[in-house]
Amino acid sequence: MSTSDKSEAFYKKLKIQLQDTTLWPSEYLYKFILTTNTTKIKKLSDLFDNQGAVITTKESKNGKYTSVSINLKMKNPDAVISKYKEVAAKIEDVISL
């Protein structure tokens, strides 16, 4: 199974879970981990800018990685998944949780 097949299977499963557990529109908490790099962190923040997102960051103990939590009101599961895909396409080496 290729990486893109695994990704699509993941997103399909996520969509079903979101539909089954949440009333939409709803607040959604995105969590990402990336290497501590101010350019990458700003680029990630900019993808959610001007949408009412609450963004918090926390560096790892040794400062090598930064976790970024983004709380944002989303209209439906498709919008949530679309944002995950946008982040993956525009930011290199980001881990989505």
Image (spheres, grey):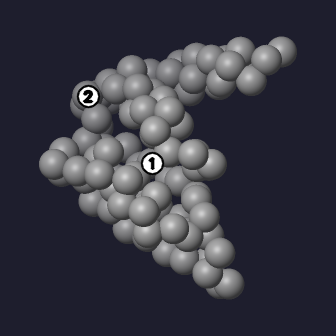
Q: Which residue lies furthest to the front in this view?
A: 39
User: Which numbered marker is on residue 54?
Assistant: none
Q: Residue furthest right?
A: 1
State the residue at coordinates (57%, 23%).
Answer: 11
- Is residue 21 visible in the rendered image? The answer is no
Amino acid type, mark 1: Tyr
Q: Which of 1 and 18 is in front in this view?
A: 1
Vertical arrangement, residue 61 with respect to residue 84, above or below: below
Q: Would you identify the image quadrant in which residue 41 lies?
A: bottom left
Q: Residues within 10 Å of mark 1 (few under 14, many from 20)?
A: some
State the residue at coordinates (83%, 15%).
Answer: 1
Q: In this view, does 46 lie to the left or right of 90?
A: left
Q: Determine the CA span between mark 2 and mark 1.
A: 14 Å
Amino acid type, mark 2: Lys
State the residue at coordinates (50%, 33%).
Answer: 89
The picture places residue 19, in percent across and down from the top left corner, at 44, 22
User: Which numbered marker is on residue 75?
Assistant: 2
Q: Would you identify the image quadrant in which residue 75 lies?
A: top left
- Quickly name the residue at label 1: 30
